[in-house]
Amino acid sequence: MSSLESKNDNQSWNNSYMLNIPMIDKQHMRFFKLFDMLMALNKEVDKDFQIQEVLEELEKYTHVHFNTEEALMRKANVPDYDLHVIQHQLFIQKIEEFKVAFSYKNSLLLEQMVAFMRKWFLIHISEIDAKYVEPVQKYLVEKAMEQE
């Protein structure tokens, strides 16, 4: 069983996913709110326009979050930075594919897309993002001390 198959499709945000980097944790929480909004809208009739808006917001927010995360990682000289960026690029590509797929108005497909995104994020936070916590926290402490 792969990591993607082992996580619960309906898993929502909980504090165990926190990295203790406030700006990143806040952004991660926002993703789960967007996922929840998509799932709730998908159960409604004639909500295609709102779903499309949330998908657009998700795409925009993904760029904001990944840019924030990547900037912190660069400044903190996080090892394997390039591999992390590739993971981000693959996720962005997947969102673009999902937007095209949604244009076919398949509600089951939307549920599968959201389940994939939610699982990807859970795994990404717990297994990939967790690797940069220590160097980023160290960088943030050093930066705060310089400003005193």
Image (cartoon, helix red, strand yellow):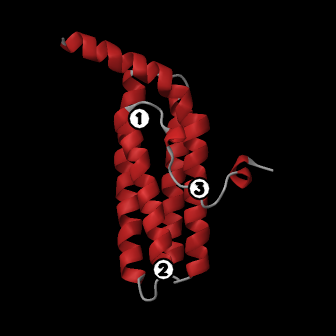
- Identify the residue at horizontal 60%, vertical 62% (top origin): 115
Mark 3 sits on what residue?
11
Kindly identify which residue carries mark 1: 70
Q: In the image, 106: left or right of 8?
A: left
Q: Answer above or below: position of 100 versus 15.
A: below
Number of the label disc, if any, that sits on residue 52: none
Q: Which one is nearer the viewer's eye here, 89 or 5?
A: 5
User: Which residue does the image show at 56% across and 27% down from the upper left?
Assistant: 131
The part of the image, by quadrant, that contains residue 107 is: bottom right
Which percent across, then down, holds residue 47? 41, 83
The amino acid pointed to by label 3 is Gln
Looking at numbered disc 2 in the image, what kind of residue is underneath it? Ser
Q: Is residue 77 visible?
A: no
Residue 111 locus on image (x, y percent)? 58, 71
Q: What is the CA distance from the residue labelled 3 to the residue labelled 2? A: 26 Å
Left or right, residue 63 beside residue 103: left
Q: Earlier in the sequence, mark 1 or mark 2?
A: 1
* Place of residue 100 in the rendered image (x, y in percent of width and height, measured from the top left): 49, 73
Q: Is residue 45 above or below residue 144?
A: below
Contact (CB < 8 A) between labels 1 and 2?
no
Dot 3: element: loop
The residue lying at 35 percent from left, 57 percent from top is: 60
Identify the residue position indicated by label 2 in the image: 103
- Residue 115 in sight in this render: yes
How dense is the environment of label 3, judged by Cα within 10 Å: few (below 14), some, or many (20 and up)?
A: few
